[in-house]
Amino acid sequence: MFRKNKDRNDRRRILMYRILKGFTRFINRYSVRQFLIGAVIIAAAVIFTFEGFELIYKSSVITRQTALIQNEAVLISAEYSNYESLAEAERNSMNSRLSSYSALNQIRIRVVDMNYVVCMDTYAIDTGKTILNSRVFDIFRSHKNSSGYDKKTGNIEAAVPVYNSTGDFIAVLIADLDYTEIDGLFHDVNGQNNNIKLVIITVSFVALIVGIYFMNRPLKRVIEIVANVSAGHTDERIPIKGYTEIREIADDFNNIMDRANETDQSRAEFVSNVSHELKTPITSIKVLAESLNTQDDVPIEVYQEFMQDIVSEIDRESKIIEDLLTLVRMDKSASSLNISSVNMNDLMELTLKRLKPIAQKKNIELLFESFRPVVAQIDEVKMTQVISNLVENSIKYNVDEGWVHVSLNADYQYFYVRVEDSGIGIPEESINKIFERFYRVDKARSRETGGTGLGLAIVKNIVLMHHGTIKVHSEENIGTTFTMRIPLNYVDNQQ
């Protein structure tokens, strides 16, 4: 029995959890939140608008009725100016005329004498009673008209001074309009307004739902395409149309996917190229070694030539592996720089001295120009690799009897290295891609010169590690210029 109750409670908790989870997911939907926010705004706008108009209209009616009652009170009080006293007016049927007027216009009229006693009340309620009314006290004191709306009683009241035929102040006349009936009319109107509010809010809610549906259709399409891409359909793209925000999202997403596809293609091409590059030297070494083994009494000259070719292929293989390992090390988060103060003038001269024999083989003029002494905080080994790669590329992809000019300059914050050549140049469509690690401008020429497409990727990574920038300007068959800017003082952002 206990186990059955426990199982029942567990099922109940699981059911409640699923219901709560489903409700939470429903509330968190963008369209539901749009509807809730829109519904609150619409309901509040309709209610406050109607209430505001009702309040304004009611205030205007009260203002008009108050002015009307005050005018009536002034006209009635003027009737007493034909008599010397209240008693004479009563003897001339003044009270009867006031009663008839009151019954006809539904206005209560009271006359208060100088002793604050009500000597005449058309409703016969306060006759003979002493009145304690602040409005009456004010008129006895100032002899000025007074009127207003009493929210407690719902009456509009106007009090005016009464003067006799000789102009003496003899009494106060109070005219009251019972506003209950008009207020009741407002309640009836409010009931009708509530029905109108309900209709307007309902229609607005329906229009809101329809509007949200059509407004969110582009967003739903974006979500579907993103889901398809996540499922592996990487060729899908978001149509660039609809709202500005959707177009911006579509443009950015499509650019990301295009770059991702380009990277995938470059990676596949890189793997293919590297596989070929790694296999080619091994194949050449094998062929050369087999040739030596299958021949008897090989002349020493041929033997030395074959061994030199084998050494060259081994060097080529080593260079490819070295570049690959360099990129791997740079990709690791633990990669760090060995920073020290280095004389850039000496570093540049030493690096170019090592590259001069390569330039001389192609009769290329290698010129270095230094504008001032420069000492910078850099990783000497990595910066040497950057300069070597840039200058060596300028030599390799140059024309015979061309030139390579290297310059060093500095200001108070940065030092600048400029490598300019008279080489074959870079096509315009390739300039933005040359720093990608999987990209080579001319695959055939790269193989001829021993390039792997990794050198400039290594250069850019090292420059970025030094918080610097590198830019390139090139024209085909005219030449290429690389400009590098590196801070003189290295700042470790991870500290």
Image (cartoon, grey):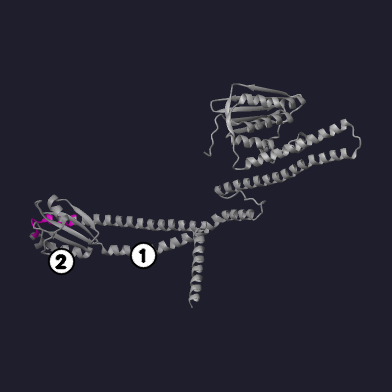
Question: What's the CA distance linking mark 2 and mark 1?
Answer: 34 Å
Check residue 125 in the rendering and tell me which mark sits there, or answer none. 2
Q: Was residue 77 drawn as part of the magenta stretch in this picture?
A: yes
* Left or right: 268 as drawn, with respect to 294: left
* Left or right: 302 as drawn, with respect to 146: right
Q: Say if 351 sits above or below 225 in the image.
A: above
Q: Position of residue 261 (x, y in %)?
A: 67, 47
Tell me which label, 2 or 1, sits earlier in the chain.
2
The dominant secondary structure in magenta is helix
Q: Position of residue 134 (x, y in %)?
A: 16, 55
Magenta region: which residues? 74-86
Residue type at mark 2 is: Ile
Residue at image position (14%, 50%) is 142
Residue furthest bottom as drawn: 1
SS for dot 2? loop
For the question of whether residue 341 can be seen, the reply is: yes
Q: Badge 1 is on which residue?
A: 191
Front residue of 284 and 46:
284
Q: Position of residue 469 (x, y in %)?
A: 60, 33
Front residue of 165 and 404:
404
Q: Say if 336 sits above or below 51 in the image.
A: above
Q: Position of residue 343 (x, y in %)?
A: 60, 25
Residue at image position (53%, 38%) is 493
Residue at image position (66%, 51%) is 234
Residue type at mark 1 is: Gly
For the question of whether residue 436 can be seen, the reply is: no
Q: Say if 387 sits above or below 146 in the image.
A: above
Marks 2, 1: nearer the viewer: 1
* Left or right: 319 as drawn, with respect to 82: right
SS for dot 1? helix
Front residue of 161 and 186:
186
Q: Was residue 133 drawn as part of the magenta stretch in this picture?
A: no
